[in-house]
Amino acid sequence: MRKQIAAANWKMNNTLEEGTKLLNDIINSNIQVNNHKCVIFAVPFPYLVSANQQLDNKSNMFVAAQNCHYKAAGAYTGEVSVDMLASINIHYCVVGHSERREYFLESNQLLAEKVDRCLSTDITPIFCCGEPLAIREDDSQNDYVAVQLKESLFHLDIEAIQKVVIAYEPIWAIGTGKTATSAQAQEMHAHIRAVLANQFGNAIADNISILYGGSVKGANANEIFSQPDVDGGLVGGASLIATEFIQIIKALK
């Protein structure tokens, strides 16, 4: 079975005190995370070390960075390298989130470099892809997402691509009042897997975890995660509420 993942993306939220309490509330719920499952907390940079300490000795729970720089080192004030992340024992990094693409104009080519940089230090990239509203309304979402995958991931060899986690974000269904159905989620996840299979083969594609990142909540997680090609979620707002995220973790297959 593919790894089933509940990934929390705190974005630019929580003070250290609030974040510490949120993690403690989840840890103290005594939720069991079986070996085919994984819970990841993508916390702001200042909290990476403390969050890692809180999760020490917690089975199948990990901390992720929300971003990294595409260079190994240099005069890039305010940026964080993957070597820095590796040095504090961080094993996951979100790459290409829709907000990074939109607000910071990160291109597919730049993200290919970030993916390479992560893999060079054995950090697992959680690679985000997805289409905005105009693309969905034009019914060209399949081609749009395929280009994202091809330009950022198709340079990888078979060994490397298996170390990548993919997260599909229907940007048009986040904060727009529009809602993506579980069937729409499954349709795109199946398309992503087919694109990967065409490049890397069915056996490889069938082993890659693909997460859904479209307003997952405790109330809809069971339905979304039950879809055959959905392997969990990259969760934003609901991950900031302990009871919600606990319910989402429990919804993993």
Image: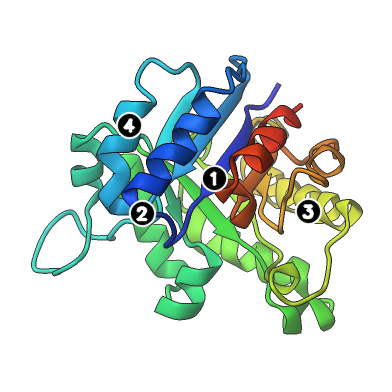
Instruction: Mark 1 and mark 3 in contact? Answer it, CB < 8 Å.
Output: no
Residue 142 on image: x %, y %: 76, 66
Identity of the amino acid at label 2?
Answer: Thr
Disc 4 to disc 3, how far (Cα)?
Answer: 35 Å
Most foreground residue, 152 or 99: 99
| Earlier sequence position, callout 4 versus callout 1 | 1
Are the residues tagged 1 and 2 within 8 Å (C-beta)? Answer: no
Q: Is residue 201 shown to the viewer in this render?
A: no
For the point 51% across and 53% down, the residue is: 153
Q: How crowded is mark 3: few (under 14 residues within 10 Å), some or many (20 or more)?
A: some
- Which is more foreground, mark 1 or mark 3? 1
Q: Distance between the residues labelled 3 and 2?
A: 39 Å
214 displayed left or right of 82: right
The residue depicted at 29 percent of the width and 28 percent of the height is 53
The residue sitting at 60% across, 46% down in the picture is 241
Which quarter of the rendered picture does the C terminus lie within?
Answer: top right
Query: Mark 1 = which residue?
Result: 8
Q: Is residue 42 rendered to the left or right of residue 171?
A: left
Give above or below for 183 relative to 140. above
- Comparing labels 3 and 2, the label whose residue is closer to the camera: 2
What amino acid is found at the position of numbered circle 3 in the picture? His
Q: Tag on residue 52? A: 4
In front of the other: 164 or 235: 235
Q: Distance between the residues labelled 4 and 1?
A: 14 Å
Helix, strand or loop at mark 3: helix
Name the residue type under label 1. Ala
> For numbered disc 2, what is the local secondary structure?
loop
